[in-house]
Amino acid sequence: MATGLAVLSTGLVVAPLVAIFVYLIYKGASSLNFAFFTQIPKPEGEVGGGMANAIAGSGVLLGLASAIGVPIGIAGGIFLAEFGRGTKLANAVRFTADVLNGVPSIVMGVAVYGLIVTPAMPFSALSGGVALGIMMIPTVTRTTEEMLLMVPHAVREAALALGVPNWRSVLSITVKTASPGIITGCMLAFARVAGETAPLIFTAFGNSNWSVALNRPISALPLEIYRYAISPYDDQHRQAWAAALVLVILIVTAVSLVRFVTGRGVLKGAS
């Protein structure tokens, strides 16, 4: 009975993902062609075109967001778990991370618009990356903290007994032991921001032309999906479904590749 309930629960968890993926294939696979991946959008009302600029733009934005959110988030998690236990600063950081996790993404976009876009720079890829990076930080921080706390304290004591400095023990032993869980947290944060549209409306803004410059407006798949979804043209509706399918495939592929590569590294290091 217990095994049956476990299998049923697994099926219930996996079923929504499978249903969404199958429906995206049904609606969007027919619009995937060579032009979709190599051309930029056509003017309103014209049939054809593609989303090459949006695919490249999503890569730029997610790369910037990861470069900002992952190091800061992991550093924050290490501080909370290893160096700041019981301190007021650690409690403040933990509370801030929990609050940021619950802040709506559109509020984050408006905040970055007011703090960065208006006073410092126009709509740009950099401001979009900052918005998405800030959204990644709390998830990475809290996941890193929880994974580090699961590492047995005896591992730390063994390293210290051998004369290893505390900072070296944390980086070389504790973090390495918890690295699969930390990587999972990073991937969860990555997958969450990959489909965000609201923050990019106020920061990256979108661009119908080819652009990967950090100081200029840039396109992204979520922005194009939103713009095409509210369009009155059927061809753009079909391309929106195709873009949604590509976005899901890119996220699944990126997560799978990172888990595969790092998993092999962890196993090799353990052996």
Image (cartoon, helix red, strand yellow):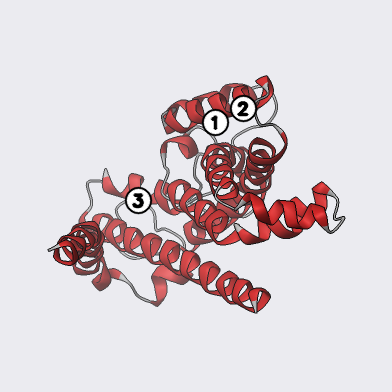
Image side of residue 6 versus residue 215, left or right? left
Does 122 sit above or below residue 228? above
The total of numbered circles placed on residues is 3
Q: Disc 1 marks which amino acid?
A: Ala
Mark number for residue 225? 3
Please report whichever mark, 1 or 3, sits nearer to the chain's N-terminal start.
Answer: 1
Disc 1, disc 2: CB below 8 Å? yes
Q: Residue 24 placed where, x, y %?
A: 24, 63
Does 92 sit above or below residue 245? above
Q: Residue at x 26, y 71 (%)?
A: 29
Q: Disc 3 marks which amino acid?
A: Ile
Q: Residue 7 placed where, x, y %?
A: 19, 66
Image side of residue 179 versus residue 139, left or right? right
Secondary structure state at the residue bearing disc 1:
helix
- Residue annotated with mark 1: 97
Q: Residue 189 placed where, x, y %?
A: 49, 48
Image side of residue 120 versus residue 209, left or right? right
The residue closer to the viewer here, 193 or 34, is 193
**Other residues around mark 3 within 10 Å, as few (<14) / some (14–19) / many (≥20):** many
Secondary structure state at the residue bearing disc 2:
helix
The residue closer to the viewer here, 149 or 155, is 155
- Residue annotated with mark 2: 93
The residue closer to the viewer here, 91 or 194, is 91
**Other residues around mark 2 within 10 Å, as few (<14) / some (14–19) / many (≥20):** some
Q: Residue 194 placed where, x, y %?
A: 46, 51
Mark in the foreground, 1 or 3: 1
